Image: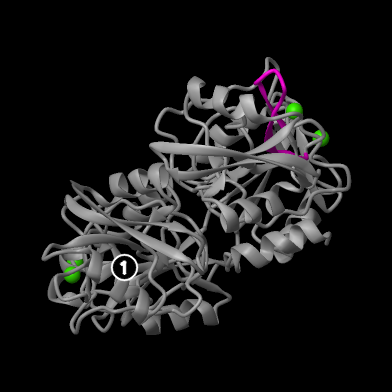
């Protein structure tokens, strides 16, 4: 592991691993990266995300030294402010104009190592190696009234940023042609400005900075898509034809006798124990074909399958239950739900509000509320109250565009900070839940609920069954027949 990878891990914290079987599926058909992405997504998954060395080793063992697409890509290479990768200002505030003044052909990410921006003596910009020592331009004042200061001393981009933050406001932020001229008029040679880039992101939106590039990769230029090869990552032209790896996809297990109906009424847990004792598990339903096959077997009675929601109160348990929109793990596991919450009311509440006394409650994500964003790093968060009612998803997009993300709260002090920015209103924070998982660990998101199910009737329906061609949630201690999958039962 080189120091660059190590640094990434230190900054990002832990990218938690997906547990379970059938996590990755190798598709041995050569496709372009975009066609491979479409293929995985059409089966309710996405191109594979690689979160740590265990993932990478598992994946390397599957690929037999072939170049194989994963979800890594850098398609936003030329764009400003696209989350989670590409260009942003060191101030961590959004440019009011999106102004950029790159020279023709730039930014070129030449050699895969150019992630900081210099202004040249003709006023155009170029992406360059951040470790290079150059003169630089700072600014003082506010975003609306900047005064620029040329520092005729050569430092790396990071050291220049520290210098500017100590002596002025930050490295130069430039939002229009006039400001660019002001900076240009003071410089005598190439100078760092505050623009930099975070390259590469995952197709499924996971914000995980684990990287393990082979030496001299990424090569940059126009290679915008990522693959694994020989135990590491490589960048390639996206239209290269390669096999690929999906994760979370819902492929059907081939063959007859996949499912076995057991016509003895048992509780969900006893049914699970029975199936497992026969070297299988309660049935996983991966698509409509599976569901139809299973419905034909069950003759209009409630019949248990492997679906369950036991982690309803727990943080960070994969694949279901609570996580932060940043997709980074809470350093503390802090939660501040009020007594009786989260209650998953009517089986529809999967996003979290801070209420007017500072405690939390789960609520339907589609409801519009004001919200709280944060900027800065996980260790130094600044919270921003947004007085505009949006759904949780729209609020998240807003925060990712204008700040870092929806508010992540990791201790009582941060909870107080958020609470103090709000006056007597409910606000979205970044906590949300992925409910339901399969008993056998399959990470497959196919769901086909019957009617208004899941309804969490009575507040404690944690186990899944099939009924009349759809899924229902149900009290686990009720006894029903059940369906096992895996090895054929005698
Ligand atoms: Ca360049
Ligand atoms: Ca390459
Ligand atoms: Ca609730
Ligand atoms: Ca129900």
Residue 191 percent across, percent down from the top left: 71, 35
Q: Height in image: 351 above or below 239?
A: below
- Name the spot of residue 439 as percent of width and height, x first: 46, 71
On screen, 317 above or below 91?
A: below
Identify whether 106 is placed above or below 339. Answer: above
Judging depth in this view, the residue of 174 and 62 nearest the camera is 174
Does the image show residue 348?
A: no
Q: Which residues are magenta?
A: 113-127
Asked whether residue 149 is in view, the answer is yes
Residue situated furthest top in the rendering:
104
Q: Quadrant of ligand 1?
A: top right
Q: Is residue 231 left or right of residue 456?
A: right
Task: Reply yes or no: does residue 145 show up in magenta.
Answer: no
The answer to which image quadrant residue 34 occupies is top right
| SS at circle 1 | strand
The residue located at (37%, 55%) in the rendering is: 294
Residue at point 72%, 22% (across, down): 121
Q: Residue drawn 51% across and 69% down?
A: 379
Q: Is residue 274 above or below residue 218?
A: below
For mark 1, what is the residue?
464
**Mark 1 neighbour class, 10 Å CA radius: few under 14, some 14 to 19, many 20 or more:** many
For the N terminus, which image quadrant? bottom right
Inspect the magenta stretch and tell me whether residue 124 lies in it: yes
Q: Judge: label 1 CB < 8 Å from ligand 4.
A: no
The quarter of the picture where residue 112 lies is top right
- Residue 193 placed where, x, y %? 63, 37
Of 87 and 220, which appears nearest the observer?
87
Secondary structure predominantly adopted by residues drawn in magenta: strand
Residue 489 at x, y percent in the picture = 53, 71
Report the number of numbered marks: 1
């Amino acid at each position: 592991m080189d120091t660059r990878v190590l640094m990434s891990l230190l900054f990002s914290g832990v990218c938690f691993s997906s547990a379970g079987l059938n996590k990755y599926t190798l598709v041995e058909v050569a496709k372009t990266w975009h066609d491979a992405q479409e293929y995985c997504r059409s089966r309710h998954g996405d191109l594979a995300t690689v979160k740590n060395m265990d993932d990478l080793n598992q994946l390397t063992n599957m690929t037999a030294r072939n170049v194989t697409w994963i979800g890594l890509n850098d398609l936003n290479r030329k764009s400003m402010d696209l989350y989670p990768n590409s260009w942003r200002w060191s101030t961590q505030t959004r440019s009011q104009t999106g102004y950029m003044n790159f020279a023709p052909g730039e930014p070129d990410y030449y050699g895969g190592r150019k992630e900081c921006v210099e202004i040249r003596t003709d006023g155009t910009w170029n992406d360059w190696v951040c470790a290079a020592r150059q003169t630089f331009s700072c600014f003082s004042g506010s975003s609306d009234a900047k005064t620029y200061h040329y520092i005729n001393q050569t430092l790396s981009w990071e050291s220049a940023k520290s210098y500017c933050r100590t002596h002025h406001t930050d490295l130069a932020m430039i939002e229009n042609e006039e400001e660019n001229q002001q900076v240009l008029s003071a410089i005598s040679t190439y100078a760092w400005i505050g623009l930099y880039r975070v390259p590469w992101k995952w197709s499924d939106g996971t914000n995980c900075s684990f990287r393990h590039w082979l030496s001299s990769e990424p090569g940059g230029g126009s290679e915008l898509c990522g693959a694994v090869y020989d135990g590491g990552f490589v960048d390639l032209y996206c239209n290269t034809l390669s096999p690929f790896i999906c994760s979370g996809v819902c492929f059907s297990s081939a063959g007859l006798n996949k499912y076995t109906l057991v016509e003895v009424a048992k509780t969900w847990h006893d049914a699970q124990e029975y199936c497992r004792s026969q070297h299988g598990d309660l049935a996983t339903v991966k698509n409509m074909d599976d569901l139809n096959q299973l419905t034909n077997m069950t003759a209009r009675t409630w019949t248990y399958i492997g679906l369950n929601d036991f982690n309803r109160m727990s943080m960070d348990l994969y694949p279901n239950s609570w996580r932060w929109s940043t997709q980074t793990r809470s350093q503390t596991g802090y939660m501040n739900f009020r007594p009786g919450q989260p209650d998953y009311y009517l089986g529809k509440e999967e996003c979290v509000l801070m209420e007017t006394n500072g405690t939390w409650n789960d609520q339907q994500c589609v409801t519009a509320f004001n919200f709280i964003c944060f900027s800065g790093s996980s260790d130094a968060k600044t919270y921003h109250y947004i007085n505009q009612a949006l759904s949780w998803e729209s609020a998240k997009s807003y925060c990712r565009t204008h700040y870092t993300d929806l508010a992540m709260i990791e201790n009582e002090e941060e909870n107080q900070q958020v609470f103090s920015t709000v006056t007597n209103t409910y606000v979205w924070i970044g906590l949300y839940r992925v409910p339901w998982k399969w008993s056998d660990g399959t990470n497959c998101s196919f769901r086909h609920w019957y009617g208004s199910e899941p309804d969490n009737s009575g507040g404690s329906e944690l186990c899944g069954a099939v009924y009349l061609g759809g899924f229902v949630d149900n009290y686990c201690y009720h006894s029903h027949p059940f369906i096992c999958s895996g090895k054929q039962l005698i």
